Amino acid sequence: MAISDVSKIHAPEPHRHVKPPADPSALEHEQLLQGEFWRTIPAYKDIDEPTFLDHVWQYRNSVKTVDELANTVQDLVSPKFLEDLRTGFHRAPMNVRVSPYAMALIDWANPYDDPIRTQFIPLASRLLPDHPKLSLDSLHELEDSPMPGLTHRYVDKALFLPTNVCPVYCRFCTRSYAIGGDTDVVEKAELATDPKRWQDAFDYIASRPELEDIVISGGDTYQLPAKSLKRIGDALLDIPNVRRMRFATKGPAILPSKILTDHAWTEALISVVDRGRTMGKDVVLHTHFNSPNEITWITEKAMRLLFERGVFVRNQSVLIRGVNDDKETMRLLVKRLGFLNVHPYYVYMHDMVKGVEDLRTTIQTAIDIEKFVRGSTAGYNTPLFLCDAPGGGGKRDLHSFDYYDRENGIAVYSAPSVKPGEWFLYYDPIDQLSKDAQARWKDPATQDAMVADAIKKAKG
Ligand SMILES: *Cc1c(COP(=O)(O)O)cnc(C)c1O
Ligand code: SF4
């Protein structure tokens, strides 16, 4: 190539391709709710900042009954809404418990469509019949348990449930078979806090050299007293085969100020993380934000504290109808989490649990949202969308179905490294299907034929 040709190649372009400035809405994720936002709630109008941030005050004032709710919001809601609520509380498979922080973030002018109300407060008028293929322990966690409160499904990781209480009760909880006290509708498996049971779990983990990774969930790590958190953390770190641990909690989403005011708890967590680091072991916090509305200046402050003290935080969301099942909301959530240095790890399809059919979405909805979110921020801050296959197949990339009958809402998955040779089925909520498909689901014989056909097509 002649010298003159080279200079041509490197010659400056006649014009530059400047990306047009982003629309101001592209910065919406940075606009966090500020100030004393809780004062709009009648019961909190005289509550000052130190009181509102105090975790003890938050727990004491959590709303557990319809009367408590009515006394908190007073004339912000209509008598008709309260009636709807009363019937909803009776029919719910889960207890109700809502922190003042979450109560203050609900838009009481329109509670029917509010994403935080939808997650925690049942309304009779919104309930739909359960899918005919639904079972209570839909993930078969009980079946993969060598002992109560320990699930060993995957080769190298296990799920340890030290407690069955949570700082809040989520309507969509996967573990509604065990979490919370008995309600009118469901009798729970017993998972109460019990150190003897914990020791049995530690002994089992130590006896299985392949177990490198322990998820400490629940219930919820927020509910462990600092002493217990430290004791569990240290006991697991002392097991030579344990290399990685994650403490799981919904807490930062509904009570972020605990991280700022419960010093004993926060320091216990940090001490386990620090000790793990000196041992070459990875200890992180997994949390569970579902709505961008859950994230305020208080959340930012709490996440900043953890970041500065070296606690890495990952987030797992559930895709919930009316909460985050539209593209813009999910993108806002993902970008807001990234802004706080919280790593958006997973978005799960809603599990097939009782009494919450109104919260589920179709697999196709999730595929469409994923396509929109990918490309809007760093790849490592883009969550993987998953289906935790009912029946114990474990987590599957939701795109990896062997067959998806979109018309009848049946997705077929296989899991060669978890349960080779088996098929796992996820069903779209029936009310989201065509009228013809809804009619087919009314007939048990047709149901079985549709399922058999989907499995046959998956086999190819
Ligand atoms: C989700 C889960 C884990 C952890 O899985 P990751 O994909 O590594 O996050 C471990 N055990 C059980 C039973 C689980 O459900
Ligand atoms: S915090 Fe987690 S374990 Fe507790 S009710 Fe909610 S989803 Fe279930």
Image: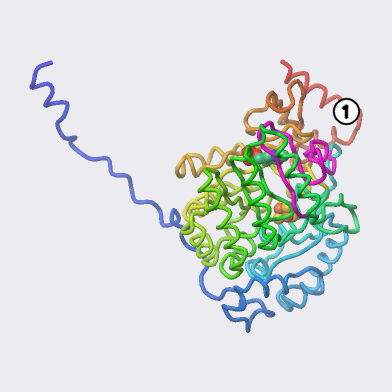
Rendered residue at 12%/21% (across/down): 5
Left or right of 14 on screen, residue 74:
right
Occupied quadrant, residue 454: top right
Quadrant in which ligand 2 is drawn: bottom right
Q: Main secondary structure of the magenta part?
A: loop
The stretch of residues the image draws in magenta is: 134-163
| Whole-percent x, y for residue 243 in the image | 59, 40
Occupied quadrant, residue 415: top right
Residue 146 belongs to the span the image colors magenta: yes
| Whole-percent x, y for residue 17 in the image | 27, 40
Q: Which residue is mark 1?
A: 446
Rendered residue at 76%/78% (across/down): 71
Instruction: Say if disc 1 is inside 8 Å of ligand 1.
Output: no
Q: In front here: 408 or 367? A: 367
Q: On the rendered image, what quadrant is the C terminus found in?
A: top right
Kindly state the secondary structure of the residue where label 1 is placed: helix
Q: In front here: 36 or 241? A: 241
The amino acid on which the numbered mark 1 sits, given as a three-letter code, is: Thr
| Whole-percent x, y for residue 77 in the image | 73, 73
Asked whether residue 99 appears in the rendered view, the answer is yes
Occupied quadrant, residue 111: bottom right
